[in-house]
Amino acid sequence: MPKRLGPNQTTHPLIWCVSIVCAILTVLVIIGGIVVFIGYATLRPKVPQVSVERAQMDTIYFDQSNLMMLQATIVIKADNDNTRAHASFYDMAYTLSFRNQKIAILKADPFDVKPNHSLELNFVAQSHSIPLNQEEADAVNLSLEQRVVDLDLRGMSRTRWKVWLVGSVKYALHLDCKLLLPVNQTTIHHPPACTSRTS
């Protein structure tokens, strides 16, 4: 049989203290959650992005021995659309290739972007003499006939920024796009599908 409290028996003070502490902690958690939610909704933090701003084929050389050399200029822009938070970008590395033949790796030292600002990074990618198999050589010949060379740009960088009371937020920014560069040194702007995806 459960033991009942008599008329002169009271709850132990320790139990009252634990109950009061739990109640206070519950109220603080609720208030904290409301404050964070209001701050998040007010600031509306946005994930920083990287994208190809413009690109240009500077030179391309291809001979009868199926050797190819080229140089391309690629400008990658880092955007921070947050109005109050600095964004840091680091571990940036993108590979420029033609039909899986690596041309160059575009790297940058860690850098910061001020709130509501952007920064353009100018890369000049210059290949060594690249030996091509027959299929790749045929693809180059076709590209030269069409006056457009298609290059692949793949890789990632990381970003970190502080969202008020939420704390530091980190993302990986993946870039995987195709650049169709005219061989007459025409600059292309904002090539399609050349904006980062986050993970």
Image (tube, helix red, strand yellow):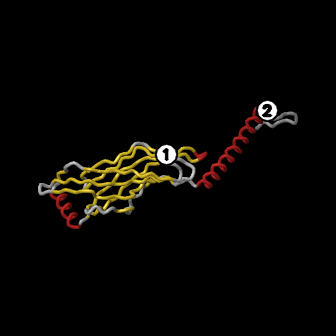
Please report whichever mark, 2 or 1, sits nearer to the chain's N-terminal start: 2
Q: Which residue is mark 2?
A: 13
Q: Count the marks: how many?
A: 2
Q: CA distance from mark 2 to mark 1?
A: 48 Å
Q: Residue at x 19, y 58 (%)?
A: 136
Q: Residue at x 31, y 47 (%)?
A: 105
Q: Which residue is mark 1?
A: 160
Residue 193 quadrant: bottom left
Q: Amino acid at mark 1?
A: Arg
Secondary structure found at label 2: helix
Compared across the picture, whether 69 is left or right of 54 comes to: left
How far across and how far down the image is residue 107, in percent? 35, 46
Compared across the picture, whether 18 is left or right of 54 comes to: right
Q: Residue at x 73, y 41 (%)?
A: 24
2 or 1: mark nearer the eye: 1
Question: Mark 1 packing: few (<14 Cα in 10 Å), some, or many (20+)?
Answer: some
Q: Nearer the viewer, residue 167 or 181?
A: 181
Secondary structure found at label 1: strand
Compared across the picture, whether 181 is left or right of 195 comes to: left
Whether the residues at callouts 2 and 1 have beta carbons within 8 Å, the answer is no
Q: Amino acid at mark 2?
A: Pro
Q: Quadrant of the N terminus?
A: top right
How far across and how far down the image is residue 122, in percent? 37, 51
Give the number of the disc on residue 90.
none
Q: Nearer the viewer, residue 65 or 114?
A: 114
